[in-house]
Image (spheres, rainbow, N blue to C red):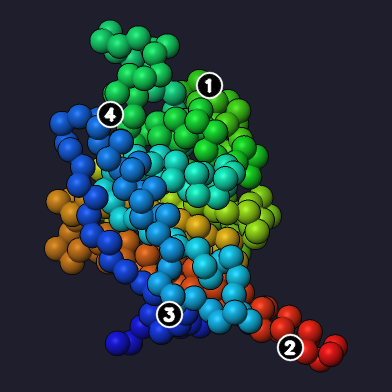
């Protein structure tokens, strides 16, 4: 199979990583609370499984990076980020930095969607869990690293107080239009500077980051987005992050064009994420090999 990624300089399918398709998580469409529980338990189960023995490096090249399983989730509704972060917080024992590509904040307080049917102070309300509130919930649960998480590609309409709440949760915001001044390299550099290269990072990519003229198959399109190529270039620029999990979400095939350009863009983005995870592992192997050689030279 021709799997070599010319942008990344690596074939993710022909390296140290053992790549598995874990299939679909069975989720009920009738009970929001049960669906969240199903997803949370599934992510914990999948994330806790050790990598196969033959995919690990030799003892002289072993590292925690190579010996840790990682999940890339495809969606679907963006709310899957909450159960993923729950599992990662438990696995790594610390809050997770989030790099969030999206036209929207997704940190809104659920009561910002007014209704006479619920108590806005009751955080156990099932309808609070949506694709626009999951990062608010994650912040309330202490899952997100405050001060080292980033939104990129923002261009949505907001209400008074939305950005203040977002700032309180510790996010840095990069607007879509910032690319005009910073360029793709500047956007990538700003993300890396904010997050760092050692902290565990969850990469969450809403396909509506891309302009709807290029990726129409999504439920909440916002005109004026980045091109597919610009987003891929930015992803290549942040390949040094310590990715412990990722998602590509909000792809809605029923809204896609005849050429399925949205699905193709999403598939390419997943390929780039996978390439970054594997490339980082190769670099960890080389680092371990160099350290081993250094110790032998001293002897």
Residue name at image x 74 percent, y 88 percent: 293
In the picture of the structure, the residue carrying the numbered disc 3 is 54
**Mark 3, secondary structure of its residue:** helix
Above or below — where is 276 with respect to 108? Answer: below
The Cα atoms of the two marked residues, 4 and 2, are separated by: 53 Å
Helix, strand or loop under label 4: helix
Q: Give the number of the disc on residue 286.
A: none
Which one is nearer the viewer's eye here, 267 or 37?
Answer: 37
Nearer-N-terminus badge (4/2): 4
Q: Could you tell me which residue is drawn at 40 percent across and 35 percent down?
A: 134
| Disc 3/disc 2 C-alpha distance (Å) | 23 Å
Cα distance, mark 1 to mark 4? Answer: 28 Å
Q: How crowded is mark 4: few (under 14 residues within 10 Å), some or many (20 or more)?
A: some
Between the residue at mark 2 and the residue at mark 1, the CA separation in whole angstroms equals: 56 Å
Circles 1, 3 touching at the beta carbon (< 8 Å)? no
Q: Which of marks 1 and 3 is nearer the N terminus?
A: 3
Residue furthest out toward the right:
298
The x, y position of residue 93, in whole percent, is 57, 45
Label 3 CA crowd tier, 10 Å (few <14, some 14–19, many 20+): few
Dividing the image into 4 quarters, which one contains the C terminus?
bottom right
The dot on residue 161 is 1
Q: Name the residue under label 2.
A: 293
Disc marking residue 33: 4
């Amino acid at each position: 199979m021709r799997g070599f990624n010319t942008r990344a300089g690596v074939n993710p399918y022909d390296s140290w990583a053992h790549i598995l398709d874990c299939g679909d998580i069975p989720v009920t469409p009738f009970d929001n609370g049960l669906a969240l529980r199903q997803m949370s338990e599934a992510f914990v189960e999948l994330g806790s499984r050790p990598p196969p023995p033959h995919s690990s490096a030799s003892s002289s090249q072993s590292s925690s990076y190579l010996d840790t399983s990682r999940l890339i989730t495809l969606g679907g509704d963006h709310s899957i980020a909450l159960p993923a972060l729950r599992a990662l917080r438990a696995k790594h024992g610390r809050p997770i930095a989030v790099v969030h590509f999206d036209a929207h904040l997704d940190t809104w307080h659920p009561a910002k969607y007014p209704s006479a049917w619920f108590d806005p102070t009751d955080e156990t309300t099932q309808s609070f869990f949506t694709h626009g509130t999951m990062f608010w919930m994650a912040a309330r649960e202490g899952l997100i690293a405050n001060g080292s998480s980033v939104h990129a590609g923002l261009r949505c309409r907001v209400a008074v107080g939305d950005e203040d709440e977002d700032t309180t949760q510790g996010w840095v915001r990069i607007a879509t239009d910032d690319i005009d001044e910073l360029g793709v390299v500047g956007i990538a550099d700003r993300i890396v500077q904010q997050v760092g290269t050692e902290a565990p990072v969850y990469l969450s990519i809403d396909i509506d980051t891309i302009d709807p003229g290029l990726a129409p198959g999504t439920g909440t399109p916002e005109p004026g987005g980045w091109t597919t190529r610009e987003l891929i270039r930015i992803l290549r620029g942040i390949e040094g992050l310590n990715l412990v999990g990722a998602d590509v979400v909000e792809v809605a095939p029923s809204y896609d064009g005849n050429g399925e350009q949205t699905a193709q863009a999403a598939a390419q983005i997943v390929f780039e994420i996978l390439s970054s995870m594997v490339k980082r592992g190769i670099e960890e192997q080389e680092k371990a090999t160099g350290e081993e050689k250094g110790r032998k030279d001293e002897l």
